[in-house]
Image: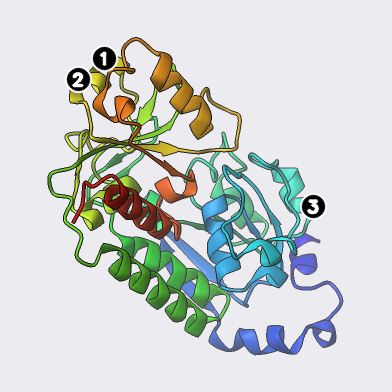
Amino acid sequence: MLVLASCGGSGESARTPAAQESTAGHPVVLDNCGTRVEVKAAPERAVSLDQGSTEIMLALGLGDRMAGTGTWTDPVMKGLEKENAKVERLADRYPSFEKVLDVEPDFVAASFGATLSKGGVAPRDQFAKLGVPAYLSPSDCVGKDNSGGGDGARTKTLGMQTVYGEIRDLAAVFDVRERGERLVSALKARVKKATSGIDASRTTLLYWFANADSPYMAGCCGAPGVITREVGAKNVFDDTRDEWPQINWETVADRDPDVLVIGDLTRRSQTAESAAKKIEFLESNAVTKNMTAVKKKRYVLLSGQAMNPTIRTVEGVEQVVAKLRAFGLAG
């Protein structure tokens, strides 16, 4: 029943001309994080299970081919509000497997392996048994070891090419390859423009995503690493390959970064999610209030998505560059 419904339910004659044309490049077969994913026709009722996947689809102009979204940390990226309004939000956090099935998906995509797992929405094989292809962002598996718990560790340094690869994969799945190439070109151009002529080689950064009690700080080689390398600065915790290690405040204060890059999240699952709460903590805590960046109020506020490997990592590059220049810490 689910498979029949996911094919449209009312017969070939009811499909739009665009949907009819979109089958031209199919089937699409991907080797995705060690799993073979075959998409026999361009999806018409896709569900994106994480905000990163959602924003790629919306940026590709696919709002009218999406049946639902889930797991949000921030407001939708600027410029995508109209597309996003077309799509039902199934949940602010993980939607239940049953809730996803209720919208009769013909394709699902996630940014994180945890989402497509027993503790998340559902393992990939549960979708596969119902004939629903499930795609996982390569940025959470290529050159990454997730076996040790936590947020995993990078065995290879992440680059924007992996994000661009995800865009191209999804563009192929939906048979909008030209849109995918235009999006990749636009993102590359933004990075080039933002970093032209910058020299931040003597500047140190620290990235704080969430939690005041046991703070999650960025290691060397995930999305914050992409930002750091693009601006030519140094991450004070580039000596760990863990994605988001939890580091005590005494160690943070000892590293004493020039600038604090702070996640400004709207979710409520950790302590100190918003930037305002983080700054309040930093300026009142006995261990952190005397740090250089705190005393000089050198804060860069980024969305959670800009600190994840997504199309908004480019936004992160732009915002960090702008603030470093405003602080007089970059050429």
Q: CA distance from mark 3 to mark 1?
A: 48 Å
The spot of residue 62 in percent (x, y) is: 64, 71
- The amino acid type, in three-letter code, at marker 1 is Glu
Q: Residue at x 63, y 84 (%)?
A: 22
Q: Position of residue 252 (x, y in %)?
A: 26, 22
- Where, by quadrant of the figure, is residue 193 drawn? bottom left
**Left or right of residue 14: residue 115:** left
Name the residue type under label 2.
Asp
x, y percent for residue 110: 54, 53
Secondary-structure class at tag 3? helix
Q: Which mark's residue is nearer the viewer, 3 or 2?
A: 2
Lower sequence index among marks 3 and 2 = 3
Viewer-nearest residue: 72 or 117: 72
Q: Secondary structure at mark 1?
A: helix
Q: How is the image coloured?
A: rainbow
Residue at image position (40%, 55%) is 313
Location of mark 2 (residue)? 254
In 3D space, how far apart are the residues under numbered discs 2 and 1 (Cα atoms)? 6 Å
Residue 102 numbered mark, or none:
3
* Marks 2 and 1 close (CB-CB < 8 Å): yes
Mark toward the start of the polypeptide (3 vs 1): 3
Q: Residue at x 35, y 34 (%)?
A: 244
Mark number, residue 250 = 1
